[in-house]
Every structure is written in structure tokens, then in C-alpha cells.
């Protein structure tokens, strides 16, 4: 039986030519290729795997468990970014109390709270606020000159999702707890009444701050859209680690991930870094598969490896693992779905580069590891040196913008400078310095 090999894709014809050069008999070739003629099974398997890579969860989970990405912030940098609530309209608060037959009127005027991360041992994940206050005292209507003081309070803070696209970092002032009150009422006479005045001051300020700032907005984070915009990464938490002076925000996603070891041990920053972003390899795989589904990473190729719509050769991303040197290795599969069909598995080394608003995933050192059907011929022929794999290296390089995650509803970006970045078998990490706050 004769076949018209002029219809074969270039990669197929190249493989046939190679076997002929090796002196393989024509009868043997026909017997080998006879098993590669039925493409239906490969087409069905490819379609199933390709479509599964496009699946998304209906919503981004609120959970802080089992997260595959984390953002780590230096608490000093966070305190600079979130240092003020931006509200200057504070009234003078006052209340009266009867002390030893005298009417004592206590008044206080609070300033804008200065927020910082980390509360006392009872609530290390709390926000702390130092509120400068100007206290006033009147005894039986006689005004005593003003003094000065500081009120220290702490309150829980957390991420409150508005929807899948925006999350607010909120300080829960309604759960406020006074941790310190240091007041000088201005003169010896007034200070003599301090033991009577202090509970009134504490009550006034506590009740007012709880009412005035219930669920006080500190900052707004946009979800980080990837690919065509339907992949979302949204912050949750946060967790504060005073011993490391860091705040960790778990990042959840609507991508469907394989089982993995969560990033719970990623809580430190290198000396000098303000912000870290850490990815688990399984998140990178899910991102790549979805981008392949969206054709951000092209799906179809011709026989030379050029990306073309509906090309006879397809690409899917399989998984990521460590190579023998501990580096991150991406495993992909080529599907040949016309004429002589089969699959060829290839492994590529991953590299990255970063600037102030994006990082670029790059691949190199392509190797065909094994094949099935006609793919086994390619693997045996050391096809990794062909034009197609060289071309695939170029189209697999993807640039991802991360600056959008720091936008918020005001659209104000934190200007960052790359400090250190790494990619290996444990995943991918980026560290930055802040050039200015939010």
C-alpha cells in the first residue's frame, strides 16, 4: 500500500526522511506508520485535557487555608503605606462626672490615628493606633488649661472581599481595645483628679472611636487579573508575624489547582526587602494551562513550530517539578493530530526576569523526554534540535504584569524596584523595595 507523503506536515516528513537515512526498510516503515494513522483517540484525549485547563471556580475563595501564593510585606513599609485614615473631622468629646460633690467635665479632642501593624501578645494580628489627644478639664464650670496625651488602642484587621475583583483591608474599630492612656492634664490641680478622670477619658474615646470608625477602610486592593482578565488573584488574611516584622497576605484564586503543599512557611523577607511575592509551582501550572486555553500561550502550531490558529500540532502544559539541579522544570506535551499522529513530551528549564511592573517567564534547554505514536519517532530522533522546538521556546515566553494588584479604587500604584528574584523547584519568588507609598 502506498501513501502520499507530500501531504505530511514538515515534522512528519522530516521524521520519515531520518528513518530512511538510517537505512530502515520501506516495508518496516509502512508497518510502523500504519499504527500512527488513526488520530481519533489522540484528538479525544487532547480535547479533554485542553478544555480542563480552562475550568475556573465560580468565585474566588475567602479561605485563608490552602493558598498557593502569598504576598509578604515588611511591617515598617506597611506602616508607612497605611499610616493615616485620612479623616480630619474630629469633634471635641465631653462628659461630666460627679466627684466628691464637684461636677467635673472632661473633654478631649482626638487627632488622626497613626496606624501601625501588630498589637499586644493578646492580638498580634491587630492594628495598633496611637491617637494624640488634647484633654480639657472643668471643675464646677471653671476651665483648667489644656494638657496633652496619647491614647494607645488596638483593633483586629482583615481582608473583606467586596466581590471577586476588589478586597478592602479593614480595621475593626468596633472591637477596639485600649492598651495605653498617657495623659498630662496640664497642671498639678488637674492631675490630682487624674484617677477620677482617666476612666471617663477612656470610656469617651473608646465609645467614640468604636462608633466613628466602625469597619474603617485602610486600603483597597484590586484582584490581580491575568491572561485575558478572567484569572483572578485576590488577597486574604492578613497574618502578622512580629518576630519577623512581616505581614503575610494569602492570595486566593479562581483557578482550579492540583493538591499541593501550602506556603505556610513563607513568612520572612530577605534583609532590605519591603515586599515579597511567592508562587507555588502548582499555581504556575494552573496559570499556564489557563493561558494556553485562552491562547495567550498559543494552542496550535504548524510543522515548523510557528503559532497558527487551528495548526495540526497542539501544545498543552502538563506539570512542573524539580530537575536534578533543583531548578524548576516545566513539562509540556506536543500533540500531532493530522496524518501520522502521536504525542511527544518535552521538558524545559524556566527562567525569569523582572522590572518595576512585570515579570517575564522564559524557557530554555528544551528536551524531548518520551513519545507515543509518531511522537516516539521524534523522541528517538532527538527532535529537540529541530526548528519547531526552537520556535516553541520563543512563543512560550510570557510577560505578566503585577503592578495592577497594587492599584485599588484610586488607581494609585506603589512604585517598586526589583530587589531579588528566584525560580527553582520550590516555586517562584520576587522581592521588591518600595520607592514610594500608596
Image (cartoon, rainbow, N blue to C red):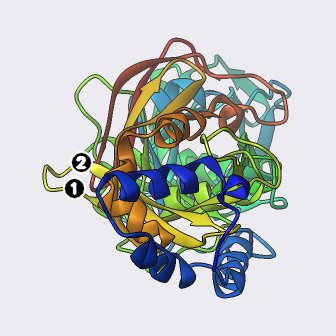
- Seen at 37% across and 65% down, the residue is 122
Left or right, 240 with respect to 334, comes to left
Question: Could you tell me which quadrant the N terminus lies in?
Answer: bottom right
- Residue appearing at x 83%, y 59% in the figure: 162
Residue 105, x across and y down, in percent? 74, 40
Q: Is residue 54 above or below residue 171?
A: below
Q: Secondary structure at mark 1?
A: loop
Q: Residues within 10 Å of mark 1 (few under 14, many from 20)?
A: some
Q: Is 219 located above or below residue 354 in the figure?
A: below
Q: Which residue is mark 2?
A: 327
Considering every residue shown, the one lying at the far top of the view is: 435
Question: Quick one: 361 or 295, which is closer to the camera?
Answer: 295
List the single residue furthest toward the left: 325
Q: Nearer the viewer, residue 219 or 229?
A: 229
Instruction: Tell me where residue 326 appears, x and y as whole percent.
Output: 17, 52
* Residue 344 sits above or below residue 384 on the image: below
Is residue 21 toward the left or the right of residue 341 in the image?
Answer: left
Mark 1 to mark 2 CA distance (whole Å)? 5 Å
Q: Is residue 351 visible?
A: yes
Q: State the quadrant of the C terminus.
A: top right
Q: Which residue is found at the position 68% from the left and 26% from the top?
A: 111
Give the camera-side residue of 192 and 333.
333
Give SS at disc 2. Answer: loop
Q: Is residue 159 visible?
A: no
Which residue is more in the foreground, 228 or 130? Answer: 228
Q: Which residue is denoted by mark 1 in the rendering? A: 323
Q: Residues within 10 Å of mark 2 (few under 14, many from 20)?
A: some
Q: Is 245 drawn above or below residue 199 in the view shown?
A: above
Amino acid at each position: 500500500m502506498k501513501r502520499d507523503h507530500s501531504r505530511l506536515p514538515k515534522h512528519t516528513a522530516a521524521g520519515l526522511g531520518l528513518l530512511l537515512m538510517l537505512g530502515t526498510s520501506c516495508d518496516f516503515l509502512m508497518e510502523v506508520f500504519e499504527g500512527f494513522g488513526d488520530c481519533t483517540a489522540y484528538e479525544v484525549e487532547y480535547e479533554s485535557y485542553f478544555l480542563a485547563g480552562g475550568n475556573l471556580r465560580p468565585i474566588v475563595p475567602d479561605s485563608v487555608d490552602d493558598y498557593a501564593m502569598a504576598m509578604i510585606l515588611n511591617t515598617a513599609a506597611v506602616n508607612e503605606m497605611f499610616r493615616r485614615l485620612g479623616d480630619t473631622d474630629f469633634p471635641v468629646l465631653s462628659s461630666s462626672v460627679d466627684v466628691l460633690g464637684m461636677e467635673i467635665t472632661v473633654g478631649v479632642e482626638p487627632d488622626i490615628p497613626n496606624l501601625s501593624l501588630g498589637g499586644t501578645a493578646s492580638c498580634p494580628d491587630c492594628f495598633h493606633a496611637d491617637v494624640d489627644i488634647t484633654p480639657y478639664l472643668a471643675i464646677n464650670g471653671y476651665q483648667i488649661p489644656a494638657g496633652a496625651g496619647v491614647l494607645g488602642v488596638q483593633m483586629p484587621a482583615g481582608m473583606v472581599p467586596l466581590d471577586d475583583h476588589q478586597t478592602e483591608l479593614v480595621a475593626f474599630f468596633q472591637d477596639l481595645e485600649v492598651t495605653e492612656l498617657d495623659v498630662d492634664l496640664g497642671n498639678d490641680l488637674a492631675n490630682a483628679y487624674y484617677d477620677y478622670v482617666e476612666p471617663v477619658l477612656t470610656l469617651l474615646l473608646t465609645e467614640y472611636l468604636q462608633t466613628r470608625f466602625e469597619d474603617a477602610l485602610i486600603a483597597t486592593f484590586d484582584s490581580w487579573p491575568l491572561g485575558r482578565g478572567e484569572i483572578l488573584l485576590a488577597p486574604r488574611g492578613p497574618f502578622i508575624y512580629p518576630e519577623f516584622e512581616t505581614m503575610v497576605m494569602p492570595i486566593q484564586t479562581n483557578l482550579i489547582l492540583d493538591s499541593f503543599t501550602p506556603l505556610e512557611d513563607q513568612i520572612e523577607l530577605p534583609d532590605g526587602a519591603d515586599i515579597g511575592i511567592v508562587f507555588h509551582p502548582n499555581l504556575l501550572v494552573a496559570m499556564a494551562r489557563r493561558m494556553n486555553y485562552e491562547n495567550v500561550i498559543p494552542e496550535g502550531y504548524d510543522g515548523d513550530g510557528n503559532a497558527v490558529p487551528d495548526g495540526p500540532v497542539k501544545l498543552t502544559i502538563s506539570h512542573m517539578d524539580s530537575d536534578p539541579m533543583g531548578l524548576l522544570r516545566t513539562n509540556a506535551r506536543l500533540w500531532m493530530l493530522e496524518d501520522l499522529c502521536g504525542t511527544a513530551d518535552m521538558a524545559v528549564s524556566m527562567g525569569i526576569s523582572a522590572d518595576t511592573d512585570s515579570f517575564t517567564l522564559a524557557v530554555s534547554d528544551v528536551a524531548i523526554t518520551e513519545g507515543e505514536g509518531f511522537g516516539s519517532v521524534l523522541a528517538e530522533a532527538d527532535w529537540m534540535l529541530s526548528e519547531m522546538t526552537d520556535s516553541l521556546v520563543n512563543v512560550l515566553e510570557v510577560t505578566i504584569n503585577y503592578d495592577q494588584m497594587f492599584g485599588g479604587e484610586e488607581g494609585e500604584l506603589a512604585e517598586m524596584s526589583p530587589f531579588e528574584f528566584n525560580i527553582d523547584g520550590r516555586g517562584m519568588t520576587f522581592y521588591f523595595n518600595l520607592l514610594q507609598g500608596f
